[in-house]
Amino acid sequence: MRRICATWLILTVCALVVAVKQVSSQSFAGLGSDADGFAMPERGYVFDFPADHGAHPAFRIEWWYLTATLTGADGRDYGLQWTLFRSALAPEESSGWDSPQLWLGHAAVTTPEAHYVAERRARGGIGQAGVIADPFEAWIDDWQMAGAHLQQMRLTARGADFAYDMQLQAQGPLVFHGQDGYSQKSASGRASYYYSQPFFEISGTLTLPEGEVAVTGQAWLDREWASQPLGASQVSWDWFSMTFDEGTRLMGFTLRDSAGPDFTAATWITPDGQTTPFPDGAFTAEPLVQSDVAGRQIPTSWRVLLPQKGVDVTVEALNPQAWMDTSIPYWEGPVRLSGTHRGRGYLEMTGY
């Protein structure tokens, strides 16, 4: 029976991956495909914490997405990623093997010379993966992000050739993107619910092939859920999170459209957590340098502009080869910022 259940789980997850890849030509990871029966984000939603730190099974897709820029005692730069994705086959929740919730975990560590990646897959309802809102705990197998209401947490993950054990402490408030957390993604009004905790201080230990490395730095957690956030012709995106040396932060993204103009949005975040949202067209990102990555040409240096805030920065990858060779591959890694503002951040690029 255990063998039958395990085989059924593998076939189910593989079928989901194949289905997602089949629709990715229309929209990355199928995020623009039809979502009949699932809930849709609405303007004016009032967030409820700590409940909204947990899962929302009435919506089709959701993620808990943490990235961190780190420095070792010798001044060497590193990057870290920990992500838990939830994807629903049906807009409902049930227990055991009847649960329609599928879970996917990604973890990575980036150095200037190497990029280490691991992936985990799980079925909901049987305890292998999930999220509890209060006290907060997100896990898949032995990977875990857990603590009190996203304020103080422990973060762990491991792969074949890396591991990390980190402590997170929030030094500022949650911030909301778009219109009070209603984040529009297309001119036609597609949207998600989207908030972040961009004020984490992080410290701990990376375990790499060369040994253990004590690191400190800053981390950024994104929380987002939706059912059909992209248009069918929005094929992919470039997403930037930037922490400037003076304490200001900027989130911006470009959603690339194969049938029309691209769509952009941005959020300016002051050191005390006050936000200013910027609509389509205010934020721009122009590729400067292309690198050969996993047989693809991928922009690993960018010029990013937000003229209303005097931002004109060059974004350069710490390691151009930060390729996530996962079920749905993408580029994700730490970046350095120079120009009108200096600092560090993270860049995610899909669809290349």
Image: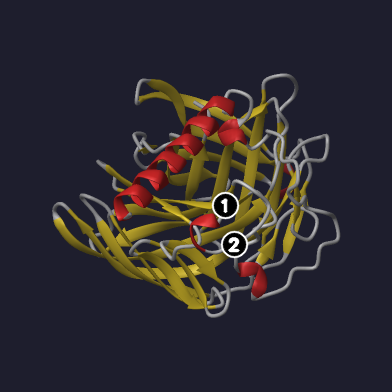
Instruction: Residue at 53% x, 61% y: name it.
Output: 221
Q: Residue furthest right?
A: 44
Front residue of this view, candidates 1 and 234: 1
Instruction: Residue at 67% x, 20% y: name it.
Output: 258
Q: How many marks?
A: 2
Front residue of this view, candidates 242 and 323: 323
Residue 166 horizontal/vertical position (percent): 35, 69
Q: Regarding mark 1 in the picture, which secondary structure is present there?
A: loop
Q: Is residue 237 visible?
A: no
- For residue 100, the mark is 1
Give, as a three-letter code, the residue at label 1.
Answer: Pro
Quadrant assignment, res 268 = bottom right
Residue 125, compared with residue 311, is above or below; it is: below
Residue 157 horizontal/vertical position (percent): 33, 60
Q: Is residue 19 visible?
A: yes
Q: Regarding mark 2 in the picture, which secondary structure is present there?
A: loop
Give, as a three-letter code, the residue at label 2.
Answer: Ser
Residue 146, compared with residue 190, is above or below; it is: below
Residue 118, compared with residue 69, is above or below; it is: above
For the residues labelled 2 and 1, the Cα–Cα distance comes to 7 Å
Quadrant assignment, res 145 = bottom left
In the visual, does 144 lie left or right of 285?
left
In the visual, does 71 lie left or right of 242?
left
Pointer 2 or 1: first along the chain:
2
Mark 2 in CB contact with mark 1 (< 8 angstroms) = yes
Instruction: Residue at 81% x, 34% y: name it.
Output: 187
- For residue 323, the mark is none
Q: In this figure, which residue is indicated by the disc labeled 2? A: 94
Q: Residue furthest front?
A: 1
Residue 102 horizontal/vertical position (percent): 51, 51
Residue 256, compared with residue 200, is above or below; it is: above
**Mark 2 neighbour class, 10 Å CA radius: few under 14, some 14 to 19, many 20 or more:** few
